[in-house]
Image (cartoon, helix red, strand yellow):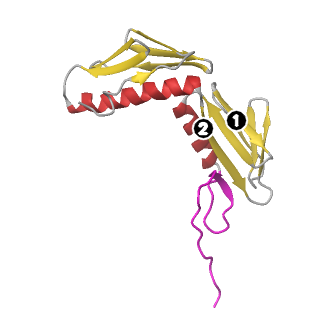
Amino acid sequence: MSRVGQNPIKIPEGVTVSMDNKCVTVKGKLGELYQDIPEPITVSVSDGNVKVGRKDDLAQTKSFHGLIRNLISNMIDGVSKGFSKDLEIQGVGFKASVEGQNLLISLGFSSPVKYTAPKGVKVTVEGGISLVVSGADKQAVGDVAARIRSFFPAEPYKGKGIRYKGERVRRKVGKTVA
C-alpha cells in the first residue's frame, strides 16, 4: 500500500466534502474546489474523514493513490486556511501597484508589465516592492507567483528583479578590465 495514500484526511469544522460521479467537491469559507478522480481510485467520506483507496496494484494506480490523497488534502487546507506566496522586487525604480483586477509592475521596460490574475487568486502589493499572492487553490497560487516572477527573474550580477521572499540569488563577479 501507498504510505501516503492510506492515511485518512481529517475534515475540519466548516468544511464539507462530497463525492459524485468521480468528482470530489470541497466547500469552505474561502471557496469551492473540484477534483476529478481517475478510474482505479476510490474516495469515501465518513465520520469526518476522507479515505482514498485503490482497486488494483498497478504502478500507475499506486502513483495516483498518493497523488489524489495529497490533492484532496490540499483542497481541504485551501478552503479552510488558504495558501499564499510572498514575492519581493529589488532594483532602482522597480515597483508594483494594483489597479482594480490588474497588477502593474514597472521593471525598467518602456512600459509597465500588466498582469491580470485568474479568478480565485488575489494579488496585493505592500509598500510598492512586496507582493502577496493568495488564494484557496495551491496550484493556482504557485502558478501565478511563478508567472509574476518570470517577468524579470533576479539576475546574478546586480541582484535586480523579482524573487520569492527569502530566496537567495547567487551573485557573480562582473567583468574586469586588465
Residues drawn in magenta: 152-178
Residue type at mark 1 is: Val
Q: In the image, is 144 to the left or to the right of 103?
A: left
How many residues crowd around disc 2 within 10 Å: few (fewer than 14), some, or many (20 or more)? many
Position of residue 174 measured from the top left corner of the image (x, y, whole percent): 63, 76
Q: Which quadrant holds the C terminus?
A: bottom right
Nearer-the-camera pick, 14 or 54 = 14
Q: Amino acid at mark 2?
A: Val
Q: Residues within 10 Å of mark 1 (few under 14, many from 20)?
A: many
Quarter of the image for residue 177 reads bottom right
Q: Where 146 sits versus 16, above or below?
A: below
Q: Quadrant of the N terminus?
A: top left
Residue holding disc 1:
123
State how far apart marks 2 and 1 are (Cα).
9 Å
Disc nearer the start of the sequence (2/1): 1
Q: Are marks 2 and 1 in contact (CB under 8 Å)?
A: yes
Tell me the residue that label 2 is attached to: 144
| Residue 153 is at least partly visible in this image | yes
Residue at horizontal 74 percent and vertical 29 percent from the top: 101
